[in-house]
Structures are given as C-alpha cells and as structure tokens.
Image: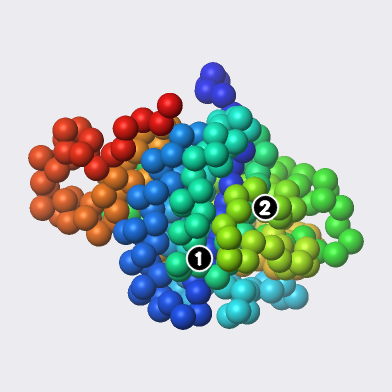
Amino acid sequence: MSSERTPDLTLVLPLRKKESVTIEEFYDYWLNAHVTLPARFPGISSIWLHAVSFDNSLFPEIAGVSHQPPAEEAFHGVPEAVFPTMDDLAVFQQHAGVQMEDGINFLADMLGYASIGSHSATVVDKLGNPAPDGSDDLVRHLVFLRIRDGIPVPDFRAYVSETLVPSWSRSPHVLKLRRHLFEELDMTLDHPGVTMFKPLELQYQAAIEIVVPEQTAMTAFFESPAWTDTIESLAEHCSAVHAARVNRCITTKYNGAITLVGVRGVLIADLIRRLDAKSQTMDEVSNLFLPAPLG
C-alpha cells in the first residue's frame, strides 16, 4: 500500500473557447501562451491538459441517454489540477491573479468541478508514465456522467465507484482508469469575464478517464462484458454519458516540478523533442525562463 498522501482537492476544468476565437487560435493560445502561467505559481502540485473533441469520440450511443452535449455546450479542453491541501489552494489563489485575468482572452466558459480527497482516484495504471508529454498515440477518453433525475447523489456515487468503475477496470484492454466524483459547481477559481456556472441540470456529477492502447482495443472493450454488462445500469443512473476523445494529454507540472511544456509551451517543447535538443532541457536553460521562487 502506498503511503503517499491523498490530495485534498482535484479540479477538473472543462474549457469552452470564445465565439470570436477559432479552434486553431484557441489551442495555439491555450497550449503556448496560457499554459506557461499556472504551473509557475505555488500551491498547485500537478497539472494535466487534455485537448478534447466530441466529434471523434469512439463511445457508442446508449438508448435513452444523451450521447453528446449540444454544440453550444461542448468544450474544447479539460485541465486537471491537483492541490495537496486547501491551504495550498489559498496560496495559489493569492498569487495567480494574472492567470485568472488571462482567461478572458480566449475563453467563454470555464467550469470548475471539484473532486474532494479520495473522490478522485486512479484505479488502474499500467502506463508507468504519470506525466505524459503529449507525444504518445494512446486512445484516451474523458467520460462525463450526468445523474438521472430521481437518483440520490450518494447512490449515484456508489454506483460509479462500486459497480461501473470496477466493471470497466476488469477489462484487459484498459491501461489506465481514473475516476472523479464532483461537487456542485462553485467559484473555486474566479476568472473575470468568463462564464463559470451552469444550471444544475446541465452540470456533471462524475467523470472517468479511460485509456487503451489503440482503436482496435477500444472496439474490443465495447464488445466485452466490461462494457456490455454496464449498458443497462448506465441508462438507469445517467441521463447523459458524454465521452470526449482526448487528442493529446500533456503535463505542465507534476508533483511540484514544472515540465518542459510548463516552461516553454507545447510548440517549443515539441520542437525540442523532435530535434532531440538535449541542451534545451538542461536546468541552466530552463532557469532562464523561470521567475525567482515566490516567498
């Protein structure tokens, strides 16, 4: 058993671009300008960025269950941020004002789903790489679940944790499975000028990250009892199963250490990796781009 402390807070943050910003501009700005800000502030320990699309999702439809959000509710990126303690969150909020103000440049919506303590958990991890740099070709999805009317929240959480996740995790095709149980939306991080709230009927109550090696493995998963045995119960418990395909998963900070992407942005980090420019990854170079530690 690991002695590693469970973080107090994990935030899953669906992002929707501004209407005036093209999808290309959104990714260019988010992954090359904005991402170099959050990782530099104290308090936040790990950050994963998921560039997502519903258009190329591989998840099949379930009768009577919403399969995709309407276009006006779809999102384009999903950061996941970890705070070891609530005091760390307060420290981050104290220093990260410039990051909050940057959101209005490219975001219309940023929804802050809080998962408290053990409500976020990695159930399966065969990858051996907790800090991906976005260069792998694994098939990833973030599956957002919306509770069906009349199902009590404790029953829904028990279903996700004790029935759905164990069934999916038994599949030999699953390389990683991570689960989040959400609180109702609140203003955990305040981005001025950006919509941060949706009515309860449009909120999600859970999300599951599922990773398989390639598309044929995803097909095999859907043909296996790990999936087929859960279709009926999913329809009973969920009014929506919205699976976003993760086109890239990128780490900008892990366990307190800023990655190359966090220092330089995705475009430059990709170029350094392609050219195997090891000199650009030296601490002496990275330190040129990092501010002095905050007191």
Comparing 90 with 60, the one in front is 90
Residue hosting label 2: 187
Q: Which amino acid does label 1 sit on?
A: Ile
Task: Measuring from the top left, give residue 209's x and y in whole percent.
Answer: 54, 52
Residue hosting label 1: 104
Image-based side of 94 in relation to 161, left or right: left
Q: How is the image coloured?
A: rainbow
Q: Do the residues labelled 1 and 2 touch (CB within 8 Å)?
A: no
Comparing 8 with 102, the one in front is 102
Above or below, comparing residue 260 to residue 233 in the picture: above
Task: Measuring from the top left, give residue 118's x and y in whole percent.
Answer: 65, 35
Residue for point 60% across, 36% down: 90
Task: Measuring from the top left, give residue 124's x and y in whole percent.
Answer: 52, 40
Residue for point 64% across, 48% down: 188
Q: What residue type is labelled 2?
A: Met
Task: Measuring from the top left, give residue 257's x and y in whole percent.
Answer: 36, 33
Mark 1 or 2: the one toward you: 1
Badge 1 marks a residue whose secondary structure is helix
Above or below, comparing residue 112 to residue 4 in the picture: below
Above or below, comparing residue 16 to residue 257 in the picture: below
Above or below, comparing residue 65 to residue 112 in the picture: below
Residue for point 69% across, 49% down: 182
